[in-house]
Amino acid sequence: MSAPPLRVGEPEDLAAWVDVHNRVSRTAVSLAEIAAYRAALPGSAHLVALDGDRTVAAAFAAPEPEQRSRGAVLAWVGVLPQERGRSIGSLLLGALSAQAGAAALTALEGEVYEDDAASLAWAARRGFAEIGRESWLALDLRRLEAPDLAAPAGVEVVTLAARPDLLRGVYEVAREAYPDIPGSTEDEMEPFDEWLAHDMSGPNDDPEGVFLALAGGEVIGYSKFHLPLARPGIAVHDLTGVKRAWRGRGVAGALKRAQIAWAQERGYERLETWNEERNVPIRKLNERLGYRHASGAVLVRGPLFHSDGNVLQSE
């Protein structure tokens, strides 16, 4: 009797998806995080490939606002190392493409580690091309002296937990900051309620880990931690944004130092951050604060595919 064909679909249990993801990716996630992500982003799909009763690969497609603004869906494919070379990745690309096409999107975008030559070559053979790069930096807190928490004259740094009434002000900073990130094509931010659900209300978000810079009672900047549930001892910088009129005055530095002190006080061992390579101001700030480079990621964009691996739609 011949073996049953590979099957692709939604997992009966999301834990199977998480298990494969964490065996393939360098960044572990928890079941609670994935469940919250799906709830906050309608239209996202988490798929698995099954060989009999074995889960051999995982993938997801998500209409993130940044990708959606470029007519694309954010995509990821991960195949267990011992299962590669069987066209499982191409099968999953076809399934993700169907998700994108159903949402009237015309391309797939994702990240590949820049030191993963095999995966970069795999993506290139399928028409994916580089559209940007992000540097990965880390700060070891275990031997770091406590930072100077002085803020620029007239500026006060508080937490969102202390001033929840200023959440709308945080959103107004985000509306200026996100479009100015190099590589961003978003002319306008998503509506407040969607931003609140996607960026501020997940299991990784803690108002105690969101820092606001105030001047005359107005929010002029903020910085935020993403706190991974599956990676204890590590806090990840999400965004540091400052209103355009206040940039170049040391506001971002004051916010970052407040984050470092907060993480030290709570026993975190390491901070991590990703910086788009063209975002020179924040890269220089992080380097001055002691962050050190490691291998980053290549941002790629490619066409939609049939499940048989043939191009469905070219741009």
Image (cartoon, rainbow, N blue to C red):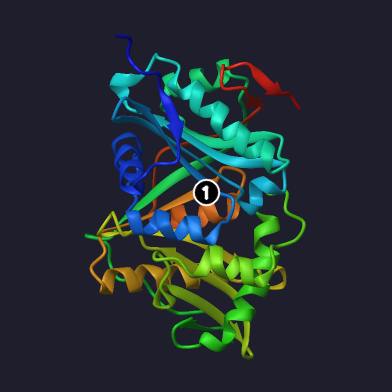
Vertical side of 309 occupied by 103: above or below: below
Find residue 216 and report its image quarter.
bottom right
Residue 308: x %, y % from top left: 56, 16
In the rendered image, which quarter contains the N terminus? top left
Q: Residue at x 44, y 53 (%)?
A: 273
The residue tagged 1 is 275
Q: Residue at x 53, y 78 (%)?
A: 212
Q: Residues within 10 Å of mark 1 (few under 14, many from 20)?
A: many
Three-letter residue code for mark 1 = Asn
Instruction: Between residue 175 and residue 97, name the one nearer to us.
Output: 97
Vertical side of 250 occupied by 154: above or below: below
Residue 313: x %, y % from top left: 72, 25
Position of 104 compared to 290: left or right?
right
Q: Residue at x 57, y 70 (%)?
A: 196
Q: Residue at x 51, y 69 (%)?
A: 200
Which element is circle 1 on?
strand
Vertical side of 189 occupied by 167: above or below: below
